[in-house]
Image (cartoon, helix red, strand yellow):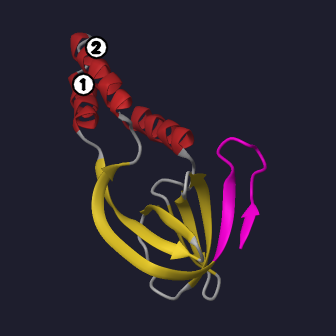
Amino acid sequence: MENYINHSEDNALLRLTGKIRSYKQERLAASFIFTDSDQTKMGVLAVASAAAGLPGQAAILSNYAAALEEEADYVQFNLGDKTVKGWLWRSPFGEGDDVIAAVEERGSEYELYGLMRPEDKVIALYPHCSRGRTRHVRAVVKWWLILT
């Protein structure tokens, strides 16, 4: 039912398996890439870009500083006696599905990062989880610099 994927003591990623029970899903908007602190820094960079005579970059950065919310599915369910909650880019799962979940323990609950249904090999991940947060931001900045 529960296996360690990463044996480090801090933020160990766990593998939970079982049948989904008490499944709830909501389509909501949230910011998955930048924290409030990151958005503040973007605002400062926007002002600096405008002062440096780069109005295009200033406009783009001010837009990023304003809001970068995206829609995703917030799901909650039980696997055995464990409560699992988290965000998935799009969730094709439902009540009674046999799944494998990649989670992190958070007190009495588990935060979800990825979910797989082995029967048909369907996988759903936390938004932008394919690269990790830092690598995704680097890729976005790299392409932004190349295209501007």
Residue drawn where x is 23% and y is 14% of the image: 53
Q: Could you say whether the residue bearing mark 2 is in a helix, strand or loop?
A: helix
For badge 1, the amino acid type reads: Ala
17 in relation to 130, above or below: below
Q: How far from the left and from the top, in percent, is residue 145? A: 42, 32
For badge 2, the amino acid type reads: Ala
130 in relation to 75, above or below: above
> First in sequence: mark 1 or mark 2?
2
Query: Who is closer to the viewer here, 30 or 12?
Result: 12
Asked if residue 84 can be seen in this view, the reply is yes
Q: How far from the left and from the top, in percent, is residue 9? A: 74, 43
Quarter of the rendering occupied by the N terminus:
bottom right
- Please give the range of residues in magenta: 1-17
Please give the residue where the numbered disc 2 appears in the rendered image. Answer: 48
Q: How far from the left and from the top, in percent, is residue 17? A: 66, 75
Q: How far from the left and from the top, in percent, is residue 88? A: 44, 64
Q: CA gap, disc 1 to disc 2? A: 8 Å
Q: Quadrant of residue 103?
A: bottom right
19 in relation to 132, above or below: below
Residue drawn where x is 43% and y is 69% of the image: 76
Mark number, residue 58: 1
Residue drawn where x is 48% and y is 35% of the image: 142
Query: Who is closer to the viewer here, 110 or 72?
Result: 110
43 in relation to 67, above or below: above
